[in-house]
Image: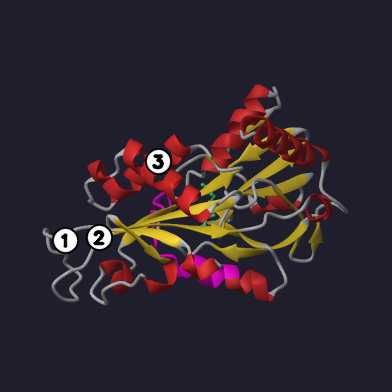
Amino acid sequence: MPNSEAVYFNGNYSPKNQTSLSILDRGFLFGDGVYELIPVYNKHIFYIKDHLNRLKSSLESINIDSSLVDDDEFIKIINSLIELNDYVNHYIYIHISRGVDKKRNHIYSKECEPTILIMGENYKPFDKSTIEYGKKAIIEDDYRWLKSNIKSTSLLANVLIKNKAFTDDAYEALLLRDQYLTEGSASNVFIVDNGVIKTPKLSNKLLPGITRKFLTDLIIENKLDFEECDISKDQLLTSDEIFCSSSTNPVVPITRVDNNVISNKAGPVSMELYNYVQEFIRETYK
Ligand code: PDD
């Protein structure tokens, strides 16, 4: 029963459909907060330390003391939710806003106590036949702010861009800033160029995706050629393969970009990585 699931909210467990928030919460009024989305595979939390480290780094970037995230305590809460709700293959969403303020004011009061929500959601990643066929993407101008490395809950630009892609029958929008690839509206992006897997370097213009790191680990472990570098629009459109990575779908081959056909089906390198991911999950989270 989805809505009777338990969620963790400010120190207590309560039913999802009976948990509510003050209208003076700065997360609601200003999108003043940060979040994480963490896959759960066969009841095991994926790359949890990396997710918690990124959460702490996001908190520090918006001047919230990250010591409120105690790794052991957060892992205990997540495991409690997995047990309480019988989560098997789900994701966990952690949302921390600056908290409830005295009034709506851009300037936050120092006394704000951060609001902490941790909840799960069922999701079904694409099946292998969808992956093999590949997905369409569109190209969009990256008009987001220049702190896209923060996993902020202020996602209006991403929401508008992702919905533009959806309206165009595409899975993702590949974002270009000054004609160079940054990332997708909700994913990181890789290309394969003459056998070399390439992705943009980490910077303030893109999110340091945990799946990006996981894939990089797999690429290095399997001795595939890899480079972090600038990728121009031309390089993107003339590449041999493109794929997107995110916690919800670790490898999504892109076979069409706007009216350009990249390939007729997912390329061999994308499929090799996809298979490594599946094998890692199967073997690690038995
Ligand atoms: N989004 N870039 C952006 C802008 C994202 O929103 C995401 C993930 C990623 C990939 O990060 P990771 O590998 O850590 O999931 C990159 C999540 C899934 C979301 O907002 O729902």
Q: Are marks 3 and 1 in contact (CB under 8 Å)?
A: no
Amino acid type of disc 1? Cys
Residue 37 seen by the camera: no
Q: Name the spot of residue 168 as percent of width and height, x first.
A: 70, 74
Q: Name the spot of residue 40 as percent of width and height, x first.
A: 55, 46
Nearer to us: label 3 or label 2 = 3
Amino acid type of disc 3? Ile
Badge 2 residue CB within 8 Å of ligand 1: no
Q: Which residues are magenta?
A: 147-162
Q: Name the spot of residue 167 as percent of width and height, x first.
A: 67, 76
Q: Which mark is drawn over residue 75? A: 3
Give the labeled residue for mark 1.
112
Q: Which mark is drawn over residue 98? A: 2
Left/right of residue 15 with respect to residue 180 in the rendered view: left
Residue 275 seen by the camera: yes
* Disc on the earlier residue, 1 or 2: 2
Residue at x 28%, y 58% (from the top left corner):
10
Residue most extreme to the right: 264
Residue at x 61%, y 49% (from the top left corner):
89
Amino acid type of disc 2? Arg
Nearer to us: label 3 or label 1 = 3
